[in-house]
């Protein structure tokens, strides 16, 4: 059963909903959570940000990530679920690769993450970390959408 549940936390509504679902699973199995936030320094590479601001910007992202992790841990604590936290930097790798790597290293029985459900050009431009995790993971992945999908008639 799912006793070691890795949860990707990024501050979005979808990630919060994923955390809620992970807590439900953990409560039903007596499991624990590994809360992971990844600072994606690719989006603030020195090519785009003047070097004088780069370190301050990355430090700000790390501080925000630590705060997000603490807030997620507090939610889990209030629900009676134990958790660990990991703040990671991508260091030039994709976020999805880092999530899968952490799931193997911990080792997780399940990965839970929110997905935005992007389609078409938006998905092509923005990419899908959730899809990449799903494709690369060796453990089950639970993807949670923030908004209920419309019913298909």
Image (spheres, grey):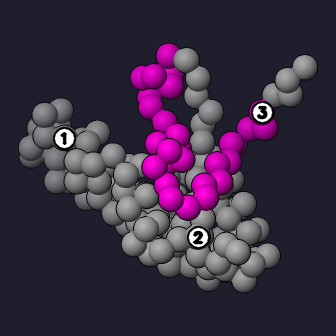
Looking at the image, is mark 2 or mark 1 earlier in the sequence? 1
* Residue bearing the label numbered 2: 109
* Residue bearing the label numbered 1: 45
Q: Dividing the picture into quarters, in which one does residue 4 lie?
A: bottom right
Which structural element holds mark 1? loop
User: In the drawing, what numbered circle is on residue 116?
Assistant: none
Of all residues, the one furthest to the right in this rendering is 153
Of all residues, the one furthest to the left in this rendering is 51
Along the line of sight, the residue nearer the viewer: 82 or 52: 82
Q: Is residue 16 visible?
A: no
In reply to whether residue 3 is colored magenta, the answer given is no
Residue 120 horizontal/vertical position (percent) = 55, 17
Q: Is residue 92 visible?
A: yes
In reply to whether residue 138 is colored magenta, the answer given is yes
| Residue drawn 60% across the image and 65% down it | 110
Start and end of the magenta stretch? Answer: 121-149
Residue 139 horizontal/vertical position (percent) = 55, 61
The CA span between labels 2 and 3 is 26 Å
The residue mark sitting in front, 2 or 3, is 2
| Residue drawn 58% across the image and 70% down it | 109
Q: Is residue 112 left or right of residue 54?
A: right
The CA span between labels 2 and 1 is 34 Å
User: In the drawing, what numbered circle is on residue 149?
Assistant: 3
Q: Is residue 134 above or below residue 27?
A: above
Q: Is residue 10 left or right of residue 28?
A: left
Along the line of sight, the residue nearer the viewer: 90 or 67: 90
Q: Is residue 137 left or right of residue 72?
A: left
The CA span between labels 3 and 1 is 35 Å
């Amino acid at each position: 059963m799912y006793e070691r549940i890795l949860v990707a936390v990024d501050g979005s509504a979808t990630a919060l909903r994923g955390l809620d679902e992970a807590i439900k699973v953990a409560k039903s199995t007596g499991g624990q959570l590994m809360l992971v936030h990844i600072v994606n320094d690719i989006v603030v590479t020195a090519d785009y940000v003047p070097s004088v601001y780069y370190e301050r910007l990355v430090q700000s992202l790390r501080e925000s990530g630590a705060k997000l992790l603490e807030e997620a841990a507090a939610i889990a604590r209030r629900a009676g679920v134990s958790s660990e936290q990991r703040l990671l930097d991508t260091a030039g790798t994709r976020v999805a690769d880092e999530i899968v790597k952490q799931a193997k290293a911990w080792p997780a029985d399940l990965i839970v993450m929110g997905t935005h459900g992007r389609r078409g050009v938006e998905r092509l431009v923005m990419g899908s970390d959730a899809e990449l995790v799903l494709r690369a993971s060796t453990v089950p992945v639970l993807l949670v959408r923030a908004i209920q999908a419309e019913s298909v008639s």
